[in-house]
Amino acid sequence: MTNAEYWIAPRPKHPLNACIEIPGSKSLSNRYLMLAALGSRPVHIQGLLRSRDTDLMMEALRELGVTCQVEDDDSTRVCVTPASSGYPTGGKQVYCGLAGTVMRFVPALAMLADGPTRFYGDVQAQERPMRPLLDALQQLGATIVYEGQEGYLPFTIHPPRVFTGGAVDIDSSLSSQFISGLLLLGSRASEGLHIRHTGKQLPSLPHIRMTIADLREAGLHIDEDEINNQWTVSSPSSLPYPKLEETVQIEPDLSNAAPFLGAALIAGGRVGVQHWPASTTQPGGLLPDLLQTMGADVTISTDIQRTCQVTGTRIIHGLGDYDLSAAGELVPSLAALLVFADSPSRLHGVGHLRGHETNRLEALTKEIQKIGGCATEMEDGIEITPVPADKLHPAIIETYHDHRMATFGALLGLGIPGIEVVNIATTRKTLPNFVALWNQMLQLV
Ligand SMILES: O=C(O)C1=C[C@@H](OP(=O)(O)O)[C@@H](O)[C@H](O)C1
Ligand SMILES: C=C(OP(=O)(O)O)C(=O)O
């Protein structure tokens, strides 16, 4: 590996004083792209995240006959025009990269296509769970042909002759994205789609609620029964396609705000993130309360900028026993902060992180131990016990092709001299300008 692949994590020279503009939400961008593709007329998306995951989504849609026209003077403005026949083009291949939203959402389009669709991805993507979703699609009349290990990429979906809906049972305990993918498919179920989760736990409920909110915005009717884990999607007979507003606006990615806002706790000083939504379905909406619990002062301005400002004193409180099942995406950033905390934390409800971009529980544990910290994997999460600051030492942080392991490494580097991060460019999955924004925050530019 050449030196260029190691990024020397910059250290703060003084307390932070920065205001950052975070690009659009990955989860909202890829949902709106899907809903526009499932619709029947062009939709203009503004503030779309441009990153590997959203570019993969647009490429997937293009493969299936959808037009995604990026505006010349602003690449975050995209006009999506569904396939003219109303049905995606079959006989194509979709490259998923390592994007959960592509591998779990685009199968909804494959179910409506006029031929089979092959799905493949990065080598590491072949370890991400797919089976529950694909078994559900089989219940709805599809045939799935696996090329390698059953239940994993690569595979081909042979859609039913016609898809009208029905009822499916699915164990979605490994990823909420299975249910979101089915809900998106339900938007085109002329006879409605009833989904029942049969597993013991259900992670990332806010992401399921996000899908429901976006479907409702597109005119769909959803009956939700979270107590019994059941959802029914139906479309008014007058509206056989999802119908988003002509122009939709994407919120900033609040999960990507986590390392920046969290930086204020490790380095001290203040960091603001602009355009914090007044209300949101993103799990990152939990950050202000979480960071406050950890000792920060958090305010959200009421002016047009709606800046979420986090002020830290370098004193960080542990979280004790804390259920993070609603916001598993935040775990890597919080884990970095908790290494510097004044008391232990046990983050529960996040066993499914083993099936994220990498096995995040194993990766976080290993990297925290590498710097002299104390972390232990639990069945449903991770335990982090702070050690005295003089026990923490420099290390090269491995990132395992995981964007959030890279930002985890950057956060460690604020508090420990000599941290280097392998392949910082992996942040391009959801935040291609991470290094520039980090330098801006540290006033290195
Ligand atoms: O639907 C979505 O946009 C997402 C759902 C969550 O997936 P899991 O439920 O697999 O954690 C989250 O971690 C992922 O980053 C994005
Ligand atoms: C789990 C994540 O991504 P994906 O959408 O690929 O599942 C993530 O971004 O933290």
Image: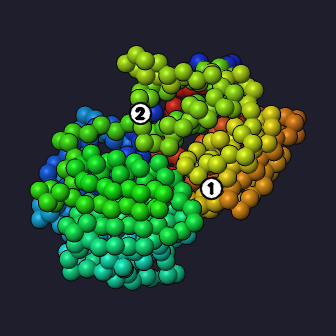
The kind of secondary structure element at disc 2 is loop
In the picture of the structure, the residue carrying the numbered disc 1 is 350
| Residue 246 located left or right of residue 404 | left
Amino acid beneath label 1: Val
Classify mark 1: residues with Cα within 10 Å, few (<14), some (14-19) or many (20+).
many
Q: Does residue 64 lie above or below 42 as drawn?
A: below
Q: Quadrant of residue 50?
A: top left
Question: Residue 129's x, y, as percent?
Answer: 52, 69
Residue at the spot 38% in from the left edge and 36% down from the top edge: 251
Question: Is residue 435 something one can see in this rendering?
Answer: no
Callout 2, which amino acid? Ser
Q: Quadrant of residue 9?
A: top right
Label 2 vs label 1, nearer the camera: 2
Whether residue 136 sits left or right of residue 364 in the image: it is left
The residue that label 2 is drawn on is 279
Answer few, some or many: residues within 10 Å of disc 2's Cα (few below 14, many 20 plus, some between 14 and 19): few
Q: Residue at x 71, y 21 (%)?
A: 313
